[in-house]
Image: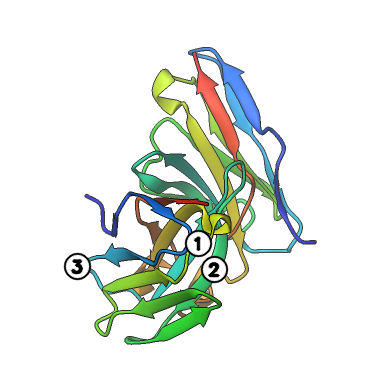
Amino acid sequence: TQLLEQSPQFLSIQEGENLTVYCNSSSVFSSLQWYRQEPGEGPVLLVTVVTGGEVKKLKRLTFQFGDARKDSSLHITAAQPGDTGLYLCAGERGNQGGKLIFGQGTELSVKP
Amino acid sequence: DVKVTQSSRYLVKRTGEKVFLECVQDMDHENMFWYRQDPGLGLRLIYFSYDVKMKEKGDIPEGYSVSREKKERFSLILESASTNQTSMYLCASSSRSLGRVRPGANVLTFGAGSRLTVL
């Protein structure tokens, strides 16, 4: 059973388009992290959201944590080829000693 | 530049061989983790350690063991490699002791990965 459902799994868009990636669960998380992974590299942290309803912006990327802390979204405005990569959400459950549960990942390809 | 180093980037082994994957971090982190990454499945936790000589099973420990003799080094061992262990293996570390974690503090720093093929 996948505790964190991430969608879509694949996304191929043209440069300049907007997109949203979703991360959903029936479980409550104490925090939600988003990572980006490029080919041949390990995932790198983009942002951590902790408070229900929290919104964080990182240039053209907007991250939101759901009010009930069960879901999160990543919105990219005017995508660029440099945004290409694998995006992973990861939930932290307070009673799991800080272990992270990862979604399946979203493979994003932005074509020029 | 702080980092997590996985010494073997690519390995090809035969079924039944013993495989060692080494991971070293230079950040003085207490916690270290081993994940495997497969398409469509995301990252799945194999084992983790929150102190020297301590280890805890993750979600998929079967067929694997680990060793943490020094704080900076966490090794993953496949006692008898099988074809279904062909995967990308990622090591990670984090800076907070699990017993003192606060929400959002358990940020992982990953190595570049070890791609293992078992024939």
* Residue A35 numbered mark, or none: 1
Circles 2 and 3: CB atoms closer than 8 Å? no
Q: Earlier in the sequence, mark 2 or mark 3?
A: 3
Question: Circle 2 sits on which residue?
Answer: A46
**Residue under mark 3: which chain is it in?**
A
**Same chain assignment for discs 3 and 1:** yes
> Residue B22: image x %, image y %?
67, 38
State how many labels appear.
3
Q: Nearer the viewer, residue B58 or A70?
A: A70
Question: Circle 3 sits on which residue?
Answer: A26
> Residue A61: image x %, image y %?
48, 73
Whether residue B12 is visible, yes or no, is yes
Circles 3 and 1: CB atoms closer than 8 Å? no
C-alpha separation, residue under disc 1 versus residue under disc 2: 5 Å
> Residue A52: image x %, image y %?
32, 86
Residue type of the residue flagged with mark 3: Ser
Circles 1 and 2: CB atoms closer than 8 Å? yes
C-alpha separation, residue under disc 2 versus residue under disc 3: 23 Å
Residue type of the residue flagged with mark 1: Tyr
**Residue under mark 1: which chain is it in?**
A
The answer to which image quadrant residue A4 occupies is bottom left
Q: Secondary structure at mark 3?
A: loop
> Residue B108: image x %, image y %?
56, 62
**Residue under mark 2: which chain is it in?**
A
Q: Nearer the viewer, residue A4 or A55?
A: A55
For label 3, count other residues whose C-alpha is less than 10 Å away and answer few (under 14), some (14-19) or many (20+).
few
